[in-house]
Image: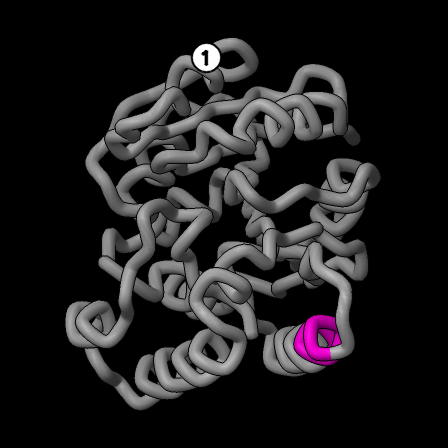
Amino acid sequence: MTQTVSVIVPTLNEEDGIDSFLRHVSGLAPDLEIIVVDGGSSDATVVKASERATVLHGPRGRGAQMNAGAREAEGEILWFLHADCFPHPDSVAAMEDALSEVAVVGGGFEYDLDHPGFFFRLTESVSNRKNRAFGLLFGDMGIFVRRSVFETVGGYREFPLMEDMDFCERLKHEGDIAIIPLRIKTSARRWLDEGIVKNLVRNWILQAGWKCGVSPNRLAKWYSFGNGYGKGHRGND
């Protein structure tokens, strides 16, 4: 049975890629509801996004923006996408198929960095294996969830960092997580702009700190934010 899908996209200064992203997403399936929640962009993100999506304005912070989008969404499936992550063409059908299993409450996709080179292929392989083995979900995996379950767990906690790992842990208490073996094409610009080794080590430290109980506020002080979510987001690795 086909379920309605709402795509929710938090943005901040994504004018360079938002049009191509929304064009790609809108072509994945008919009747997708697409909601962009902007956190105060100083560029043309809002103007460009308004041509292809419903645009909301929310307080800056991924958790807060995604919650704002979820409150306005009408779909039975909520799908949270970063503006620099391009889903596989068969993603919508694969989500619906995964959620046809009653025990599955949500999930995500394997990811694929959009840059050639051995290091990037190795990073993808290790991360995808790790995420599948431990049932981990990160924002750049295109997290999806049943709307009813999202409401049951109270949505995202509006942390300055690690809202995706926290959300994943709470989802697991409600049912099974599905990691779909279709790749979501993820921008490698953060790796290239800030340095491969720096990003890899920093993300390991952040994930280890979270697992050891370090507060999101303290972790946020360890993290050097970029100019926008796409340019400075952390996630897999």
Front-lying residue, 82 or 168: 82
Q: Is residue 14 above or below residue 141?
A: above
Is residue 96 among what the camera can see?
A: yes
Q: Magenta stretch: residue 124 in it?
A: yes
Q: Residues within 10 Å of mark 1 (few under 14, many from 20)?
A: some
Q: Is residue 83 found left or right of 119 in the rendered image? A: left
Q: Position of residue 45 (x, y in %)?
A: 41, 24
| 140 horizontally vs 207: left or right | right
* Residue 80 appears in the figure: no
Q: Residue at x 61, y 46 (%)?
A: 85
Identify the main secondary structure in magenta.
helix
User: Residue at the spot x=66%, y=22% of the render?
Assistant: 23
Which SS class for mark 1? loop
Which residue corresponds to the image point at 58% horizontal and 36% vertical from the top-left?
77
In the rendered structure, which segment of residues is drawn in magenta?
119-125
Magenta stretch contains residue 206: no
Image-based side of 107 in relation to 57, left or right: right
Q: Quadrant of the C terminus?
A: bottom right
Residue 128 placement (x, y as % from top left): 69, 73
Q: Nearer the viewer, residue 129 or 227?
A: 227
224 over 17 or under it: above or below: below
Q: Amino acid at mark 1?
A: Ser
In the image, residue 102 lies at what x, y percent?
Answer: 69, 52
Q: Give the residue pinned by disc 1.
A: 50
Residue 91 in percent (x, y) is at: 76, 42
Please tell me which residue is depicted at 78% across the width and 44% down the height of the picture: 88
